[in-house]
Image (cartoon, coloured by chain):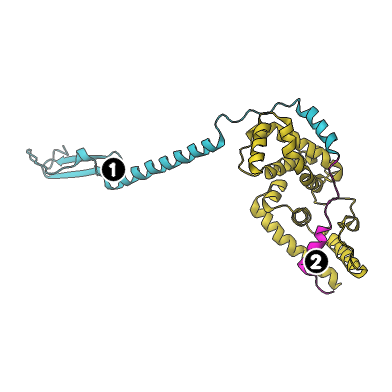
Chain colours: A yellow, B cyan
Amino acid sequence: MEENSDLLIKKAQKGDMDAFAALFEPMRAQVLPVAARLVGPDNAEDVVMEAYLRAWKALPRFGGRSSLKTWLYRIVHNCAVDMIRSKSKGELEMSGREGGNSPEADIPDEQQKPPDVEAADRETAQMVSVALDKISPEHRATLLLRYADGLSYTEIAAATGVSLGTVMSRLFNGKRRLKAVIGSELDT
Amino acid sequence: MSAMEWEGIQNGLKSRQVGTAPGGDGEFWREFRSRAGQIPQVSPPAIPPAISRWAAGSACVIFVCVLAGWSLLGRTGEPALSRFKSVDVKMPHSAVLIMSDKSSQSTVLWVIGSAGDGGK
């Protein structure tokens, strides 16, 4: 598999668009939610397209120092930042908010749960959702990229443009703050 | 409920997955191909990164070795051609000074004459 992707990288580096599509199509579903976290769902597709075009242009210089996915996350981050800069700040915000998605609507289809468990899950999701709005955008985005989107620490670092150490500290402090906010909500 | 375990919070976070699914891949890649066709790829670096890293690493090692050798020799080695085994001064003198100057790696022999005629 790795040998196959190495071959595809070499071909794509020499201008083979089919090889490029074969390499990057599987990653599209993974980078799109990240782009949506950074610029909102309405602009996510544009950011991904721009990122793929930049990746195409720069691929011959890809040296394999990081994984291709991490490299792509970094490009997506740069494209998102460029878009945010080019548009008005009020319109776009790197907040980790996905906008328009009610937590209830997003709960993935699982096996049918008893009504009381389902109700408790909904309540928890609602509480987490409210608490997320009360922590900083950086902590919120990092927590969501990790726990909702399942990115690795390295991928989060690439997607948010910060160091690995910063990702770790944001996760640690974000969890602490989220717990504290939820705790205070429960006490009231 | 007075406290919520991290596991519960994590489940709450999972429920915040962005409900964004990529659009039809046919449409995406059609647009990509039409736009990418107008973008030339950058040329690869003249020296492959692996080789340039290896070369830079080797250069660093050589530099450190040379530096270490030079400082070690400078600390222990005396200038070979300016070492005095014995001094025999035929002229009248009051003192002989032998001074080593490490910065210029030289040794200075200073013969001080009798009182009144300064140093010679």
Q: Secondary structure at mark 1?
A: loop
Compared across the picture, whether B73 is left or right of A22 comes to left
Percent across and percent down for residue B4 are 80, 70
Q: Residue at x 76, y 67 (%)?
A: B6
The three-letter amino acid code for the residue at tag 2 is: Gly
Q: CA distance from mark 1 to mark 2?
A: 73 Å
**Dominant secondary structure of the magenta stretch?**
loop
Nearer the observer: mark 1 or 2; the answer is 2
Mark 2 — residue?
B8
Quadrant holding the C terminus of chain A: bottom right
Compared across the picture, whether A136 is left or right of B60 comes to right
Q: Is residue B108 above or below residue B16?
A: above
Percent across and percent down for residue A78 are 73, 40
Give the crowd class for mark 1: few <14, some 14-19, many >=20 residues within 10 Å.
few
Question: Where are the magenta residues, as a range?
Answer: B1-23
Mark 1 — residue?
B102
Quadrant holding the N terminus of chain A: top right
Q: Residue at x 83, y 44 (%)?
A: A92
